[in-house]
Every structure is written in structure tokens, then in C-alpha cells.
Image (cartoon, rainbow, N blue to C red):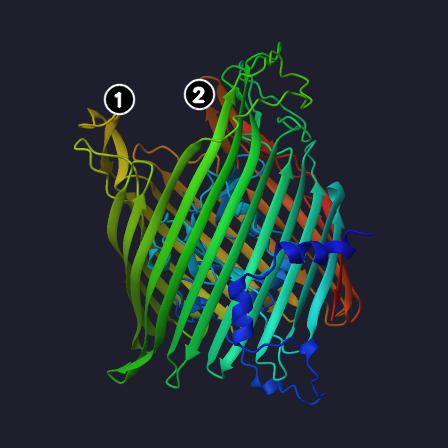
Amino acid sequence: MTRSSVVLPRLLPQARLTQALLAALCALGAAPAFAQDVPADATTLDKVVVKGERAEGYSVRKTSAGTRFDLAPREIPQSVSIISHQRIEDQNLDDILDVLANTTGVTSTQSDSERTEFYARGFYIDSYQFDGLPTQMVQNWSYGDSGLDLALYDRVEVVRGATGLLSGAGNPSASVNLVRKHADSAELTGSVSLNVGSYGRTRTTVDVGSALNASGTVRGRVIGSYLDTDAQMDRYNQHKTLGYAVIDADLTPDTQLSVGYDYQQKRANGATWGGFPMIYSDGTPTNYSTAFNPSPDWTYWDTTSKRLFATLQHSFANDWKVKIGATHDKTDANDKLFYPSYTAFNKDTGAGITPMAGFYNTHRKVDAVDGYVDGPFQLFGREHQFMAGLSYNKREYANYGDFQMGWAPLDNYLGWTGTFPEPNWAATLPLQSQGTITQKAGYAATRLSLADPLKLILGARYTDWKSEGEDNDRQHKVTTPYAGLVYDLNDTYSTYASYTEIFQPQTLKNRQGSYLDPVDGKSYEVGVKGAWFDSRLNASLSVFRIEQDNVGQITDDLVEGGSAGEFAYIAARGTVSRGFEFELNGELAPGWNASFGASRYVAKDVTGSDINTRLPQTAIKAFTSYTPQTLTDLTVGGGVNWQNGIYYAVSGVGRVEQDGYALVSAFVRYKLAPQFSVQANLNNLLDKKYYAQIGGYGGYGDGRNGSITFNWSF
């Protein structure tokens, strides 16, 4: 039996709906269509109400990203990138890591094989949203967030700069909103795809949607996916399972309810922790092969996430609407890892490596609710817009682990093959850390029409942030302002200026023993935007400056009444980042979609030194697809991602460098029949050898690789 033939049986038991989801289905009276004797003329599609904006090609005409107002991209006074479902399909992007790697102004660095950290404008991205519901993701106790599968998402929206109005706490980098696919078809429709490729890769995806009642006012959609692949790195393989189910119901023509559940599991065998040593004690690079795995064969890193969500929206006759969203997320990770610690690695004898290992079980639970109203109002003879909402987010975490060091001799790391004994782990893993972070917030904004071409957005968010546990209980109450001015030069171009903020709590204390105020991130941005072909093509050019205030700076004083040797900190001016971004995205001509982005920033700390030298400061990302009007069954395309050189100074040893490089890709898709297509994707065509991870420890990016996708739709 082939793998594709058993995908659904193994997905459905693991991703079955919760009792709450089944209860909602029963309450709606949504008897499955196949259980009813439905006359042929009983389905009336005109009763189906579908809310929301759809991407067309590579662009979207309206989005609520950044402000909650449904606006065209040129009406938003911040830099916004939309990665549409069509572009995800063209580039064969599997997960959020792939998407952000192809997003203008976003760069990344790896900590090991399973953790990738994303940055924008020099700052770490920790603010994420699911269908507009905010949450935070951090990688220090990796819960697999950077490997979120894209099969259940329609598009990804990225707003760069400070986004405190809708995000709450975070960094002045960007906010990433993942927009789910929904049950929007009242007829049986779906697709089955099989993707095979390099490193023994096979991925099967099934996506089916249909009406669940005769009128089509209640609809369901189920998505299942399974990935099995090896890698260019020896002894590494990965298995990913996804199950997703959603029910969308028109309770009335003006009231919509959506309830869903998703399950994602990733099992990574041969996972690394840290990476391989990058430099010998004499300062020369180690120059391992791209297949080198620094871990023994007993390592693994498994993650499982489960999300239950619901959204209720009602539209009033006066164009006002109310929307409430809720989610319950549970994420668990289980891993055994190996760390080849070194301070002086001898290239002749192979001595200097100390084996370290960890066995960890980590748990995170998030409960969140967000509700808001928005609509138009009249004032001084002009129409304006107003939005206000309340938000609640509670994140609980508990991390258990056993750390081992030097349990067996490792006198020579040269010629490493991965054969090394596993430690004798503790029978019960001790608790390493736990805590609860709660955010309660209220926010509001208004979009004032000062004149026909001039719009002003003013808003603020009040957040009550509280952390409990780990002996560092603290609470902050912060008001975050938002201001943006947009002026339409004509029907095509607009200019804008904005000021946005965000805050990030910290655990550092002053001399009196009080916690420092949160770090305050301030973004200043001005730019010009353009839109053509009824907003199917959008362009933006922005210039920005970001400042961080209240950054903890160590002093020579000790904390009064603090622990032994606990130095006090003072709040000082921190990092300043400035630069520009340019993006062109959408349909250049019928059948021709393209995305081109260029970004440059310089970020320095209070001493004037560059920060995060492991991140490129200049990047260009371009991709295009073309379907000839005379041969509409054929689509071809490709792209290039280029970044400048980076480096990392290893204390007392030397400096590791990565020259600038370009990764070239190409694809071709052909419809063999109206419902059947085949697509080939090639990545890193020039087979560039490069570091995806750089520091004291490193890791390589993938060499030349490719895949073929067979897709049948109905």
C-alpha cells in the first residue's frame, strides 16, 4: 500500500474534532449532506454569504492588517507585505519558515536544525496573529513555531515596524498574521496533491470542502497532509502530520460563525542542538561537508500543537460590524539533544570538545479572546471610521529537563560518525521553569477624513501585562499610541507618515530592587505608495527609524537585598535602526505576477557598534510567474534571493564570515487536463554552498534540490 493511500486514516484519529466542535455542529443542525435525501434542485447557492477579502494572484485589494480597518494597501500608513496562496503554490512553500524567507525586509538566523529566528529592521519578530488574534512566539524553549505548516493557511500578512496597537507586548520589528482557509464552497470541491523530491521527500495533501446542509448555509472543510523526508545532512529525517477541520455557517444573512480545529505534529530524528563547531583554536575554519551532522544517532526533537478556534461576526444595516474570536492552543515538545561544547578545538588532535546533552519536555498553553466593533460615522459633513475592542491573552508554560555533561570521554571529534553513548537520564525530569503571562487590553482607533485626499488614523492600546512564576512576578500597565497620516496625490499615488510604538517587559532590576520599566520601541516611518489595475498591483517605498528606550545597561552597583553578585541596571537609550524598504507586488500584466523587494537597514547600539552582525543588512528578494495568453495551460517562473555578507566574532579565537550570496529558483506548471496539473520546482539552481546558521556553531543551507507536484482538483 502506498503512503498516499493511508494519509486520511492516520490523520483523522489524531486530528479529530473536540466535543465543543461537535456540539457546535449539532447545534447548527448541520447534518452531513451524504446522510440526507436531497432533491437535485434543493441547493440554492444564492443563500451562501462569504465574508472577507480574497487574494487575486499575488496581491489583495483590501486587508485589515495593522489597523483592523478594511483598507487597500496604499491606505495603510505602514509597510505591509502580502504572501498570497497563489505565490505559496508557485514557490511550493511548505511552512512559515519558507514564507518569511521570501518576505521583503525579513531576515533570519538559525540556532540549530529546528529553531529559526526571524528579524525585521534588526529586531526579533515575536508578534504573531492567527486570523487577527494576537499571540507571542519565542524560540528559547522551541515549541516548533518556525515549522508551522502552510497547508491550512490561505495567505500571510506581514506588517513591519512597531505594531503595539493590535499586538500588545513585543519588539518593534513586525507582526505576522496567518489567515486560515475556510469552508467557502457550497458545492463539493477539493484537491489531492502528491509532491516528491530530493532527499527522498514525499508529501501528500488532501483538501475537501462541501455544504453540510441542503441550502449551503453550513459548510465544512477538511485538510490533511503528511510529509516524510530525509535531508542533505546525514542521519536526519523529518515527519510532519497535519489535520485541519473547519465549519463555517451563515446563522443569518448577516451573522457568520466559524469553528475549527487543527493538529500539527513534527518528528525530527538526528536533530542538532547548536550546530557544528565553526572554527579551530588557531582561527582557521572547520570546513565540514554539507552532509556533516554534529549529533549522535539517538537525538530527536518532536513537537505537537493543537488549536481550537471560533469566530463570530455580525454585520448591521448601517455598515457597522462586531467580530469576536477565541482560541485555545496547546503545544508540547519532547527532545533528546547533544551539544558539542568547545572553547579551543584542536584541528590536529581533535581534542577540546566536551559532550553535553539535554532531555527536555516542554509545555505551553494559550487561551485568548479578542472582540471589536467597527463602522462609519458622520461628523462635520464627512464620513469617518471608528474601531474599538477588548483583548485577553493568557500564556502558561512549564519546562522540564535533565542536563548531562561529560558522561563519556570524547577525546577526538575528528572523523565524527555520530556513534556516541546516550547518557543515563534522570528517571523523572526536574522542573526547569514555569510561569504564566497574562495580557488584558483595550484598544481603539479612528480614521478621520480631514479632506477628500487626506486621512488621519489615531489610536491607542492600554495593556495590563502581568507575569507570575519563576520568582520574578511583575506587572506593567502601558498605553501604546498609534498615529498615521495618508495623503492621496491622485488616483494612483499616496504618501504617508506614521508613528507607532510597542513595549517589551524585562527582568532586570535597578539598585533599589525594582524591575526596570519595559523597553519602549518607537517607529517613525514615511513613504509613498502606488496602486494600479484596481489594486491588483501595489508598490511602496518607505524610510524608517526605530528607537529603543529603557534598555537595561549594567552598572557597578549591586541590587539592594538581591542575590549574591546581582548587579543593578539602569534604563538607557538602546538600539537605533534606520533604513529603507521598497516592494512591488501583484499583476504587472494579464497572466504576469511578480514580487520584488529590496531592503536596507543599519542598526547600532548605544556605543555605536553594529548589532546582530549575523544578519544581513541588505537584501533583495524577487519572484515572478507568467502564463502566456496564447497558452494558458502553461505557467513558468522563477526568482532570486540575495543578501550581503555577514560575520560573527568568536571571542579569543577569530571571526567567522559568510560572503554575500544569491539563491536562484525556477518552476514550471502545466495543466495536462482541466482538473490535473504537474509542477516542477528547482531551488538553489547554482548549488551555492552557504551557512544558514553562523556563530560559534554553524549549519549549512540546502544545496541544489527540486520536487515535482501532481495535483488533481475537483
Measure how far apart labels 1 and 2 are at the Cα level. 24 Å
Q: Is residue 126 left or right of residue 184?
A: left
Place of residue 534 in the rendered image (x, y in percent of width and height, measured from the top left): 52, 75
Residue at 51 percent of width and 22 percent of height: 404
Residue at 71 percent of width and 88 percent of height: 39
The amino acid type of the residue labelled 2 equals: Ser
Within 10 Å of disc 1 (Cα), the crowding (few <14, some 14-19, many 20+) is few
Query: Mark on residue 651?
Result: 2
User: From what the image shows, is residue 428 above or below residue 458?
Assistant: above
Q: Is residue 663 left or right of residue 579?
A: right
Where on the picture, by quarter, is residue 12?
bottom right
N-terminal of the pair, mark 1 or mark 2, is 1
Work out which quarter of the rendered image holds the C terminus and state it. Answer: bottom right
Within 10 Å of disc 2 (Cα), the crowding (few <14, some 14-19, many 20+) is few
Element type where label 2 sits in the image: loop
Q: Is residue 428 left or right of residue 382?
A: right
User: From what the image shows, is residue 447 above or below residue 235?
Assistant: below
Q: Nearer the viewer, mark 1 or mark 2?
A: 1
Where on the picture, by quarter, is residue 519?
top left
Say which of 442 and 161 sits in front. 442
Name the residue tied to disc 1.
Answer: 565
Residue 17 visible, this orientation: yes
Q: Is residue 360 left or right of residue 635?
A: left
